Amino acid sequence: MAKQFDALSDALIRFIDAQHMFFVGSAAPEGRVNISPKGMDSLRVLSLNRIVWRNLTGSGNETAGHLAQINRMTLMWCGFETKPMILRCYGSAKTLHPRDTEFDALNALFPASPGARQIYDVAVDLVQTSCGYAVPFMEHKGERDVLSKWADDRGAEGISDYWETRNQTTIDGAPTHILAQGSD
């Protein structure tokens, strides 16, 4: 039942736009695989083969550490509310930190947040759809505001301290490069 494509279509982009969350998968050559749910208006489809998503400060920083070792990423959406479908976009991604020149322009695509940690600029090389018949119906009741309040309460200095103490390595000990190269 799976179908594969070289690029997104307008219909698949509409499906992505209708979803309230997506999942990110990454893995280093060795160690643990990371799968992380994302939401909070943090993704934009820029073209049929380009997606950007903004990563907010959180407890782990696995994706950055994995991409520094091997550049591969999978994004996945599930149709929880209407159409039973699973959509995966496979590709590579460029990690952009707030210190990078391209960060500000892409960050401007999203609502302001002091917790903006990275933006991933994903080059999609394979798109796959599958049935999603086993995905349950789930009702979206709204976004949680806990992470936004947490970041607002800390401010820029508190977020920077958090990066230094909690976001510099993956759970397997690989560097995430959250701080400037000389500080890692």
Image (cartoon, rainbow, N blue to C red):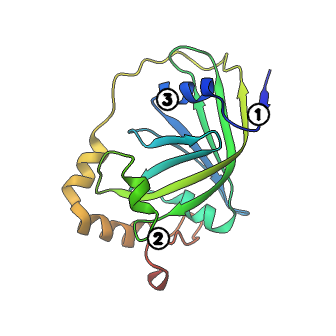
Q: Amino acid at mark 3?
A: Asp
State how far apart marks 1 and 3 are (Cα): 19 Å
Q: Amino acid at mark 1?
A: Phe
Q: Amino acid at mark 2?
A: Gln
Using the rendered image of the protein, determine whether residue 176 is visible from the camera's viewpoint: yes
Is there a contact, CB below 8 Å, between mark 2 and mark 3?
no
Figure check: 171 above or below 146: below
Location of mark 2 (residue) = 168
Near-viewer residue (25 or 4)? 4
User: Which element type, helix, strand or loop, lies under badge 1?
Assistant: strand
Bin the neighbour count of mark 2 within 10 Å (Cα to Cα): few under 14, some 14-19, many 20 and up.
many
Location of mark 1 (residue) = 5
Q: Which mark is residue 22?
A: none
User: Which element type, helix, strand or loop, lies under badge 3?
Assistant: helix
Q: Quadrant of residue 95?
A: bottom right
Q: Where does the image place residue 63, in percent across and percent down from the top left?
A: 56, 57
Location of mark 3 (residue) = 17
Earlier-in-chain disc, 2 versus 3: 3
Residue 73 relative to residue 177: left or right:
right
Q: Residue at x 69, y 49 (%)?
A: 91
Q: Residue at x 78, y 32 (%)?
A: 4
Q: Quadrant of the N terminus?
A: top right
Near-viewer residue (92 or 50)? 50
Residue sticking out furthest to the bottom: 182
Is there a contact, CB below 8 Å, between mark 1 and mark 3?
no
Q: Where does the image place residue 24, in percent across and percent down from the top left?
A: 57, 45
Using the rendered image of the protein, determine whether residue 58 is visible from the camera's viewpoint: no
Q: Where does the image place residue 33, in percent across and percent down from the top left?
A: 65, 52
Near-viewer residue (116 or 125)? 125
